[in-house]
Image: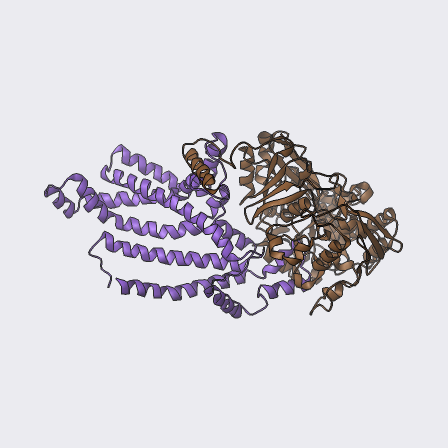
Amino acid sequence: MGRYVIRRLLQMIPVFAGATLLIFLMVNVMGDPIAGLCGERECDPATAAQLRKEFGLDKPVWQQYLTYMGNVFTGDFGTAFNGQPVTELMADAFPVTIRLTLVAILFEVVIGIGLGVVTGLRRGRPVDTGVLLVTLVVIAVPTFVTGLLLQLLLGVEWGWIRPSVSSEAPLGELIVPGLVLAAVSLAYVTRLTRTSIAENRRADYVRTAIAKGLPRRRVMTHHLLRNSLIPVVTFIGADIGALMGGAIVTERIFNIHGVGYQLYQGILRQNTQTVVGFVTVLVLVFLLVNLLVDLLYAVLDPRIRYA
Amino acid sequence: MRGAAHVTRAACAVAVVLAAGACGGGGAPAGGPDGIVSSSWGDPQNPLEPANTNEVQGGKVLDMIFRGLKRYDPKTGEAEDMLAERIDTTDSVNFTVAVKSGWTFSNGEPVTAKSFVDAWNYGAHLKNNQRNAYFFGYIEGYDQVHPASGQPTAQTMSGLKVTGERTFTVKLTQKFSTWPETLGYAAFAPLPSSFFSDHDAWLARPVGNGPYAVDSYTRGSQMSLRRWDGYPGDDKARNGGVDLKVYTDSNTAYTDLTAGNLDLVDDVPASQLRNVEADLGGRYINTPAGIIQTLAFPYYDPDWNKPGQEKVRRGLSMAINRQQITDRIFQRTRTPAKDWTSPVLGPDGGFDAALCGDSCAYDPAGARKLIAEGGGIPGGQVKITYNADSGSHKEWVDAVCNSINNALGNDRACVGNPVGTFADYRNQITQSKMSGPFRAGWQMDYPLIQNFLQPLYYTNASSNDGKWSNKDFDRLVDQANAEADPAKAIETFKQAEGVVRDQMAAIPLWYQNGSAGYSERISNVSLNQFSVPVYEEINVG
């Protein structure tokens, strides 16, 4: 187990290096960011040269990358064009996005798995058909439509919530945005759980357990659900990374100053340091969550062993 | 204190869960002269220094916390003395500036001649990376502190000399009679000594000499400004303060305004213009701002720089149905252009609605004729290049092309050529890579006709992106700058503008308006010529 974890952690090093290099190159391909800094006019050449020097843009790309990576290992992610250190931006943005992601994941787990179990056990009944239809609609409607619609209805028309999230972004204000963010994944989780439960219900071990005379509840939680959750956990695990980076639309609609917003601004302003820094952290999060998911398999299914 | 805040927050969370409405900064905001205005904001692109701010979001703050030698009247745009007691000159080269007494920064430090000279020297020096350094380019000694290449050879500009507690002299490199009128721009603001002694602390909480002082500033999310009661000027704030809130999207800010959580939105998104009457009724303003949009041409490309082609350019101009586009696409937030300046200058300032005349009127038959006479469109197709990342440029470029195609009866005569980001777009322009007309926008730095002509059309000027060059134009501009009488100077500038028209150096499209919507809580809201709200005049309650 311990050796397995260490091996996986070591594997992250090349992935990390490759990912940062790729992002670094991609942002660089977009051209010289200095040109966009002086508004609708040309920066005077002397100032432009000075700015390039300050941000290290006058050096060849490989050298820029090495300097950047060197700095990253000392905890310095560079400076954004507005003079703010990127680490400061991260300290502002990540807690907000993590809170939003937690709310979203909570919805997925509670509502998604809950509905999945109910429909899986009542296959073909009206409840099942109804939920299936609703999930179909949710999957079909794009996130920005759900977001804007809920914002307009709950925020403006009925006045139940504030249409925008304040800069502190307390959990209470993140409930509706979290629901919007989770909506599509939630529908998938429901469908995945439903299928998995429905299949495993007819499995031999469930029949044996029932034949042994175990209480129905124990069969459900200890035998059926535990075995059915493996694909769901895989999905949710991968979704954590996607939700953290992919919240751009939701964050813009609800005025959440999180990772998605910083990334969007970084890309618009061609701010290499911001984009590479944030994406690097996201890559790390993704890798760690994947490791965690793999370890969870062993908990859910004792037959899986990591040596 | 902290504990109490947590309790409130928790209570708010519970309240929201129970669907019990808004939970803001605790309690209903006060009205009357101490009421606080909440206003939408965008994260300033550059650090908030006066000589480093060239966009409207940072400009808003500077307009509240700084006052310079001159100030542009928010209604007429005229440059009026603010901190300047007088600015004298006999030869339009040497100026003597006297600063009024009794002015201090909000930290108590008096505003002296040194506050100005130090600030300007800081703004001009190459090592300080100030985006607006070129504003000081007319002052003697600028080349030594800001050489075009290499290292600076001096620390301060030789043209600036402190001659007394409240007087200093300025020597320019050329005659520039209207130079004092440029001093209302934020880059010329005075700076307190704390700016230089503890720069980081100053940036974290800027200190100025305007009607407001910064109370707290959380970068990237909010700035709270409060009225400074010790402000000595006449334009004291009529409200208790302003909270600027950063929004991720102007649509969200607009939604917050309609829901009653925000008082002022100074950038109504294009997609909401249709609803603005229904949502806000009369609480919507749409006034001219000093911005003109044009189509510039790449004169460095031999295909676009042949004699006789001014006819092609004029023909293209006449093939654009400006009225229809401004009505349909911009919902009248832009006005068809009739010259190369802006209505905010007023007729006395050099705006002339008759200057472009027929050349800017829609006339398909005339357009076809002129383009044929001028040798046709180079390469048979006009490609209008624009950046697609902001400002609904795609919509209007497509509309302009449609209009040209219809007028010429050829649906391949004009196509749009989008570039992904603004930075990349600027890059291609700087490297002279444009292969046809391209979008050009000009927001004035100060309300002078000179600012609409010289930076854009003078040979090798800083924003002459198309590299247009014309001896007559250059000569007239030099002549106008040397003219001691402002009225005569403006007449000469208009003659120079006539050259731009005859050559159709760039096609004027439309003047941009500033737009804003506000809540029922506040009144007396207006925008100045820079489309920045005049915050100090807003009444609350």
Coloured how?
by chain
> Which residue is at a point 57% across and 31% down the rendered structure image?
B279
Locate the C terminus of chain B and report the quarter of the image it occupies: top right
Q: Residue furthest right?
A: B90
Report whether A157 appears left or right of A187: right
What percent of the width, then of the height, locates residue B10?
Answer: 43, 38
Nearest the viewer among B61 and B368 is: B61
Q: Quadrant of residue B525?
A: top right
Q: Is residue A145 above or below residue B185?
A: above
What percent of the width, then of the height, locates residue B97?
Answer: 82, 52
Q: Is residue B230 above or below residue B126?
A: above
> Which residue is at a point 45% across and 65% down the rendered structure image?
A73
Q: Residue furthest left?
A: A212
| Visible residue check, residue B74 | yes
What percent of the width, then of the height, locates residue B74?
Answer: 73, 40
The brown chain is B
Q: Quadrant of residue B377?
A: bottom right
Please give the count of numbered marks on the rendered protein.
0
Q: Tell me the shade of chain A.
A: purple
What percent of the width, then of the height, locates residue B188?
Answer: 73, 52
